[in-house]
Image (cartoon, coloured by chain):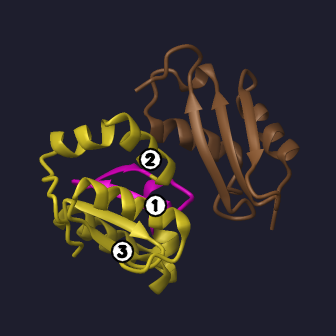
Chain colours: A yellow, B brown
Amino acid sequence: MDSMSSERIRADITTNDVVLYMKGTPVFPQCGFSAQAVQILNMLGVRFKGVDVLTDPSLRQGIKDFSNWPTIPQLYVKGEFVGGCDIMREMFQSGELQQTLQAKGVALEPTPKSA
Amino acid sequence: MAMDIIEIERLILEALPDAKIEIKDLRGDGDHYAAHVESAAFAGKTLVQQHQIVYAALQGRVGGVLHALALKTSAPQARQA
């Protein structure tokens, strides 16, 4: 993998508690799956950094190599890959996502803002 | 830029011979599927690992020729956490 993008990813996921690699931005998602991921995080009131992979082809490929995961969106919490859209939805519905976030010390706020 | 259900099933069964697979073509366009895969290979694995097993079975097609595969995985009987 291109080492620039892996370094950038490592820096992003270690300096931000919650990072969502997505197509588009949290305000204007460019794909239905990314939109669902944003919606889940907003419903939980999680502050997160959205990283738009469409702005950088090396990052779009880099994030897939980094996590050994073929699709976007991808959620990282405290540096750890949690899953893609399906896993986020399944964990959200079972309450496991809330538990995971809280166990990792991520605040769930009523009025979220994305960085 | 599409795959048919039979081909998806064949590739998953090649990697997971015991798998029970249900696939729906969500839009009838051969490009947006939902699959439920049940296999003993998922026992004791995290959801991320379970999905990675299916993605590996599909040999790089997910995210490529196969644009969208909404995936649900489980081990027989109790679902593993």
Disc 1 with disc 3 on a shared chain = yes
Residue at 64 percent across and 24 percent down: it is: B39
Q: In the image, is residue A13 above or below residue B71?
A: below
The residue that label 1 is drawn on is A36
Mark drawn on residue A99: none
Residue at 73 percent across and 21 percent down: it is: B18
What SS does tag 2 mark? helix
Q: Nearer the viewer, residue B50 or B35?
A: B35
What SS does tag 3 mark? loop
- The CA distance from mark 2 to mark 3 is 17 Å
Pointer 1 with pointer 2, Cβ within 8 A: yes
User: Which is more N-terminal, label 2 or label 1?
Assistant: 1
x, y percent for residue A110: 16, 59
The amino acid pointed to by label 1 is Gln
The residue that label 2 is drawn on is A89
Picture quarter with the C terminus of chain B: top left
